[in-house]
Amino acid sequence: MKKLIILLLFPIIFYSQTSLTNDDIYAAAGNEYETLLTNIEAGNNFPAVSELLHKIGMVDDETFKTKFDVLNQKWKYIEQVTSGNQKPRVAYINWTGKKVKGYSQPIITKLEIWGDTEYIIKFYINFWSRAINFKDTKPGETVTTRFLSDVAALSVGTNGQSKIVVTTAKDYYK
C-alpha cells in the first residue's frame, strides 16, 4: 500500500510546475487580461498586467529605480493624469521567482500589487473575471478569487492603501 501511495504521489510532485499551454490558459480566461500569474515563466504574463494598469489610468514610472535582481523585481506605476497640485496616486508591483532547470526565465512564485485602494480594487475586479461581491467587505478584510492554479487575495486597507497577493493555490492553502 505504501508503494502504491508513493507511486501515485511521485508524478504529482515531479510535475508540480504548471503544464498548461497558452491555449489552455486563454480558454479558461474570462476576459482579455485574465491570465496565469504564477508558476509560469516571467515575462509571459506581465503584458496583461501592464496593459490593464494603463487602461485604468496608470503608467510605468520610468524614474523609479531599484537594484536589479532577476529573482525579485519591482515596478512603480503612477496616475497618468492629475489636476492642479494633486499628488499622483501610486501602485507598486513586485514579483518573486525561482530558477527552474529547463526554463530560460525565472518561474514566478508570488506577485504583489499594492497602493491606492481605488486603483487596486479597479485592477482586481477587471483582471479576474469571477463574480466578486464587495458589498459586505469592510476595510481590513480579505477577498480571494481563484484562476486555474492562482489564488489572488485582495486585502482592503484602512488607510487608503490596499494590496493584492497572488500565489499558487498550493502555497496559499498551506
Image (cartoon, rainbow, N blue to C red):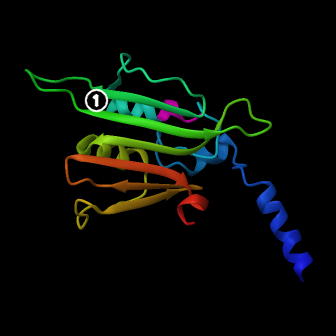
Residue lying at the far front in this picture: please name it: 67
Residue lying at the far left in this picture: please name it: 84
Is residue 33 among what the camera can see?
yes
**Figure quadrant of the N terminus:** bottom right
- Percent position of residue 128, x then y: 43, 50
Based on the picture, tell me whether residue 45 belongs to the magenta stretch.
Answer: yes
Q: Residue at x 92, y 76 (%)?
A: 3
- Boundaries of the magenta span: 44-48
**Figure quadrant of the C terminus:** bottom right
| In front of the other: 66 or 130 | 66
Residue placed under numbered mark 1 in the picture: 57
- Percent position of residue 90, x then y: 28, 32
| In front of the other: 35 or 74 | 74
Dot 1 falls on a residue whose secondary structure is loop
- Disc 1: CA contacts within 10 A as few (<14), some (14-19) or many (>=20): some
Q: Residue at x 33, y 55 (%)?
A: 155
Please identify the quarter of the rendering in which residue 26 is found. Answer: top right
**Would you place residue 16 above or below residue 49 in this image?**
below
